[in-house]
């Protein structure tokens, strides 16, 4: 048995692709990582990364498909102080993932988008994987290892 | 999200509180842009000291207001940035084009 297996956990949340659920998704992620005793910055980093991925699913993934009652799913799992968060939509998908991940790249400059979402996810999490193809939806898998409050006294 | 305006000589100050995300950014954009276009002040300051959360939707909203002030020949500043929001500004290069007080 791994030493910290008592923390092992998995949660699946399915939500309507509506913008009010961006805040809900952030709250779910905060609650899920609470047992890891995250520092204030770790908490902000996870909330921000989740917000980026869920917003992208709602805004880009399901753009123009609101009538199909689209859903976003968020699967979170915890193993040995490492959290894995998968955010998935069944929307338009991304034709060119490396291009989409480029800082400042956006397909919606008209909508006051800065093209910084993926860059934020990459800099706030330890790893970000994007599984997507045109017409096939998008899944973003993010991982982060926690310090377990070891530097919370310093914050 | 809540918003309060303060009119100073030739400057509009918008004090934002709460969370800035995609859900709230559209309303923020609309209300700040409307107040700015109604008035005659050239300069705009966004005060973020009561903002508890911001993601890239906030970055886009700030750039949008910066463009509004450019169109009118004014200056834009942001104030009251927390460490986390400052990090977003630096990541996106916003601190290079917008005055941070
Ligand atoms: N879930 C998704 N489904 C379809 N396209 C996506 C998805 N996520 C991202 N994209 C595409 O990748 C581009 C870059 O995403 P990113 O989050 O970096 O920037 P943005 O959303 O355009 O702007 P910002 O996040 O700064 O508001 C988007 O403009 C969009 O074209
Ligand atoms: Mg985005």
Image (spheres, helix red, strand yellow):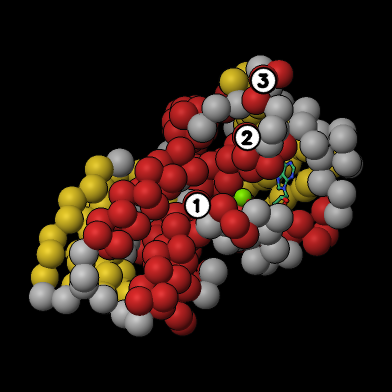
Q: Closer to the N terminus: mark 3 or mark 2?
A: 2
Q: Position of residue A151 (x, y in %)?
A: 41, 55
The residue under label 3 is A67
Left or right of A133? Residue B20 is: left
Assess disc 3: are there few (<14), some (14-19) or many (≥20) residues with their C-alpha within 10 Å of its C-alpha. few
Name the residue tied to disc 2: A58
| Marks 3/1: CA–CA distance | 24 Å
Kindly tell me whether residue A85 is visible in this rendering.
no
Q: Residues within 10 Å of mark 2 (few under 14, many from 20)?
A: many
The answer for how far apart the CA atoms under marks 3 and 2 are is 13 Å
Q: Chain for mark 3?
A: A
Q: Chain of mark 2?
A: A
Kind of element beneath mark 3: helix
- Res B57 label: 1
The reply to whether the C-beta atoms of the residues labelled 3 and 1 are less than 8 Å apart is no
Q: Is mark 1 within 8 Å of ligand 1?
A: yes
């Amino acid at each position: 048995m791994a030493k910290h297996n008592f923390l092992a956990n998995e949660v699946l949340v399915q939500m309507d692709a509506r913008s009010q659920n961006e805040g809900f998704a952030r709250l779910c992620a905060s609650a899920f990582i609470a047992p890891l005793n995250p520092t204030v910055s770790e908490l902000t980093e996870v909330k921000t990364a989740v917000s980026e991925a869920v917003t992208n699913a709602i805004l880009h993934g399901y753009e123009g498909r609101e009538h199909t009652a689209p859903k976003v799913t968020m699967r979170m799992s915890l193993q040995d102080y490492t959290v894995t968060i998968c955010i998935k939509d069944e929307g338009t998908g991304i034709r060119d993932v490396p291009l989409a991940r480029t800082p400042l790249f956006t397909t919606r400059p008209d909508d006051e988008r800065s093209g910084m979402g993926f860059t934020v996810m990459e800099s706030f999490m330890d790893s970000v994987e994007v599984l997507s193809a045109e017409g096939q939806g998008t899944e973003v898998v993010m991982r982060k290892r926690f310090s377990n409050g070891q530097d919370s006294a310093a914050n | 999200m809540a918003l309060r305006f303060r009119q100073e000589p030739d400057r509009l100050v918008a004090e934002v509180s709460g969370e800035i995300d995609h859900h709230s950014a559209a309303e923020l954009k609309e209300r700040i842009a409307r107040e700015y276009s109604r008035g005659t002040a050239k300069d705009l300051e966004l005060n973020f000291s009561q903002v508890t959360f911001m993601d890239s939707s906030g970055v886009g909203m700030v750039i949008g207001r910066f463009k509004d002030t450019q169109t009118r020949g004014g200056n834009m500043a942001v104030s009251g940035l927390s460490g986390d929001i400052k990090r977003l500004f630096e990541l996106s290069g916003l601190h290079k084009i917008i005055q941070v007080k």
